[in-house]
Image: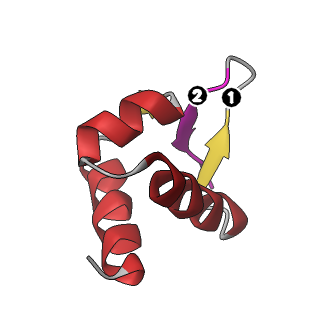
Amino acid sequence: MELERVVWRVREEFLEMPGLRLTPAQATRLWGLEYETCRVVIERLVASDFLRWTTAGLVTRAES
């Protein structure tokens, strides 16, 4: 699957479920991605300020 499409899909999941908080391992399983692909997707969404890391090591939607 094209990376930009995966980024869009993950972004949509977080928009549909605003309270979603996942570890990278949980995200990998939820979206059926290879670990490295999932890591890149998360990094892109964090870099764009859409997602953020919690102190517990979870990724969640960044609030405006």
Q: Which mark is residue 54?
A: 1
Relative to 7, 55 lies left or right: right
Q: Residue at 61% of width from left, 67% of height from top?
A: 44
Residue 14 in the image, given as x and y percentages of width and height: 36, 49
- In the foreground, 51 or 2: 2
Q: Element under label 1?
A: loop
At horizontal 67% and vertical 25% (from top left) the residue drawn is 57
Residue under the image location 57 percent in, 62 percent down = 40
Residue 20: x %, y % from top left: 38, 33
Q: Amino acid at mark 1?
A: Thr
- Cβ–Cβ under 8 Å for marks 1 and 2: yes
- Name the secondary structure under disc 2: loop
Which residue is identified by label 2?
58
Q: How far across and how far down the image is residue 34, in percent?
A: 39, 51
Left or right: 19 in relation to 12: right
The quadrant the N terminus occupies is bottom left
Residue 20 in sight in this render: no
Q: Quadrant of residue 8?
A: bottom left
